Amino acid sequence: MRILIVAGVALTVVSVGAIQDATIVTNPPERFTMRVVTSGLDGPWELTWGPDSHLWATERRGRRVIRVNPADGTRSTLITVHEVHQSVTQDGLLGLALHPDFLKSLVGNNDVYLAFTYDDAPGPALARRMGIRRYQYDANARTLTAPVDVIMGLPTHDDHVGGRLVIGRDLKLYLSIGDLGSNFGANRCNENRAQDLPTMSQIGKGDWSNYQGKILRLNLDGSIPDDNPVINGVRSHVFSYGHRNPLGLVVGSKGEIYESEHGPNTDDEVNLIEGGRNYGWPNVAGYRDNKTYVYANWSASKPAPCRTLPPGNAVPASVPTQAEMAWNNERFTPPLRTFFTVEGGYKAQGIGSATMAPGGIDIYTSNAIPGWRNSLLALSLIRGVVYRLTLSPDGRSVAGPPVEQFATANRYRDIALNPDGRTFYLATDPEGPSRDPSGSPRPLANPGSILEFKYEGN
C-alpha cells in the first residue's frame, strides 16, 4: 500500500508500478565513466563549480559550506552557519551563489551569497523564516568572513521550501520560495497563497508574508530593483508568481532564467521565467488542459471547517473544486515542458508513479559533446536520472524529446559542470525515496555523495 496525493488529498492505494513517459529517450548513445568523488556528506544541496577549479557545496543538514577538490575528493569546511534551523527534510542551509567576478585578479569580488532557514523566535516557540546573507571569501585562510544580512524574514515552513539562489547576468539575485506545502498533505488546511501579491502597505512595512510561491529578484544589497515588474500596481521583490515547489534555477547564455518545480504527483514543470508572469499554481498544474489535475481548495471548506474533515479517499462536498480551464489570468504562462502530464482518468499508483520530482537544473553550452550544446539538464530526485532538454535557438522552447542521462539508484539534488564540457558532478541526497523504472522502491547506492561522470564518446 502507498499514499497518493491528488489535489491535496491523501489517498491509500495499491501500487502496481510507475508510469513511464513514452516521449522520453531512455537509451542514449553517449557513454560516461562514473566515480565517487567524495561521500559521507550531510545533505549536499547546492553544488557549484568555482573559478578556483574546486567544487563548492552547501550541506543542508550539516549547516556547512564546503570546498571539494574534484581530483581526490579532499574537502575543507569554509564556514558552519550556526544560526541555520534544520529540523525537517527540506529546510537548512540551501542556496549558494558566487559573485560573477569571484576570484578575478583585476576586478575581483569575493562575495558569496547563502540562502538558509532560521528560527526568528527568541523563546521556545518556533518561527520559521528564510534569509539571504553575504560573506566574503578569504582565499588565504580559506574561510567565509564578514557576514552581512541581505534580506531576512522571508516566509518558509516545513514543506515546499524552495531556496535556490542564483545571480543573473543583470547582477541581480534570484531566489525561489515554494508555497510552503499549503493545501497539501499535513498542511492541507493552510491557505495557498502562491497567487497572492504584496500590497503597497506590506512593502512599506517590510512584510514579506505574501512572497509564498514566488521567485524573487533583488539587488545585491537586498533592496527592490527599480526595473522589477509592477504587478497589480505594486513593485516589490516579486519577479514571478504561481509556483508550487521551485527547486531549480539557472541563468541562460543570454540572461534567461530557467526553473524546474514539482507538480502534485503529475505535471512537473520546466519553465522560462519572465518578469511579471503568472505560472498558474494552485489553479493550474502544468498546462491549462483540464486533464487529471483539479484544484480542491481545502482551506475554503464550508460549512464544515477544514480541520474537522476526516481523512478519506474523496474530496468532501464542502471543499470547493475548480477545473483548470475555469480559471483565467492574462499573465498566465505555460511551461516549456512538463513531465508525466497524464490523460484524464489516469489512476495514479502512488507518489512517484507519475513524477520525476525535480531537483536542480543547469544549462550546457559547450561543443564538447556532439548535439548537446544549448541543452537544459533537469535533475530527478525520485528516478535518479538527469533529463537533457534541447532548447530551440532562441531559448524559448524545447526542441525534441527529453533524454535520460546518468541513471543510478540515487536522488540527484544538484549538478555542477566542469568547463571542459566533458565532466559533470552530481550531488546526491543522504536519504529519501528512490524508484527503479518499474516503480519499485530501491535503496540508495551513493547517499550523501558527489559523483563524477566523464564523457568517453558515443
Image (spheres, rainbow, N blue to C red):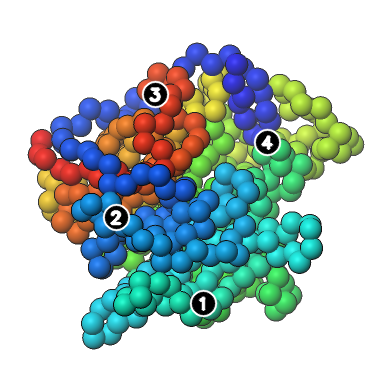
Mark 2 vs mark 1: in front: 2
Mark 4 secondary-structure assignment: helix
Secondary structure beneath dot 2 equals: loop
Residue beneath label 3, please? Answer: 436
Q: Nearer the viewer, mark 1 or mark 3?
A: 1
Q: Residues within 10 Å of mark 2 (few under 14, many from 20)?
A: few
Say which quadrant the N terminus sits in.
top right
Q: Is residue 395 visible?
A: no
- Provide the residue designation for mark 4: 185
> Disc 4 or disc 3, which is closer to the eye?
3
Q: Residue at x 74, y 48 (%)?
A: 191
Percent x, y of residue 30: 16, 36
Using the rendered view, name the quadrant where residue 387 is placed.
top left
- Amino acid beneath label 2: Thr
Q: Residues within 10 Å of mark 4 (few under 14, many from 20)?
A: some
Q: Which residue is mark 2?
A: 74
Q: Residue at x 35, y 75 (%)?
A: 141
Q: Residues within 10 Å of mark 1 (few under 14, many from 20)?
A: few
Residue 144's spot in the image, x, y percent? 43, 73
Whole-angstrom CA distance, mark 2 to mark 1, is 26 Å
* Residue mark closest to the camera, 2 vs 3: 2
Q: Is residue 182 visible?
A: yes
Question: What residue is disc 1 on?
Answer: 147
Give the residue at the far left of this rendering: 457
Task: Label 1: state its secondary structure.
Answer: strand
